[in-house]
Amino acid sequence: MAINYNLSKVYAISDNDVEFARQIVVLFLEEVPAEIKNIKKGFKEKDYTRVYHAAHKIKPTLDLLGMDLAYEDALAIESWTRAEGKKKEIKEIVKSLRERVKLTVKELRKDYSL
């Protein structure tokens, strides 16, 4: 049973197509960790544009995979970039997003033998 993700939206839009769900999982595994690295690097360099684009890019995927808390983290990060806030204001949220994605990647790799 999935703990960190929920594919009900994927199955709903695909008419329960298992292969489509697998493709979404593979896409997540390929793209989201790379964007998390962009967020981390942009955050370290205080590159608000880079952080914004990375957070914005992963939002739909987080939503589609039912990762509600990670989605909320991405929204908060986007807001922080628009306000060009201080790093300490968002540090824990960035850490939370990274951890949630890391756990989901681990779970998806196990669940889908990838």
Image (cartoon, helix red, strand yellow):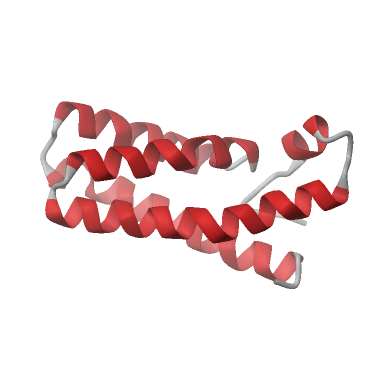
Identified at 59% across, 68% down, the residue is: 106
Identified at 68% across, 54% down, the residue is: 25
Q: Quadrant of the N terminus?
A: bottom right
Give left or right: position of 3 versus 97.
right
Camera-side residue: 34 or 40? 34
Where is residue 13? Give x, y as percent: 78, 30
Whether 74 is drawn above or below 103: the answer is above
Identified at 40% across, 53% down, the residue is: 35
Whether 57 is drawn above or below 95: the answer is above
Identified at 66% across, 58% down, the residue is: 26
Where is residue 108? Give x, y as percent: 67, 62
Where is residue 98? Give x, y as percent: 40, 56
Where is residue 47? Give x, y as percent: 16, 46
Whether 35 is drawn above or below 76: the answer is below
Q: Quadrant of the C terminus?
A: bottom right
Give left or right: position of 112 versus 106.
right
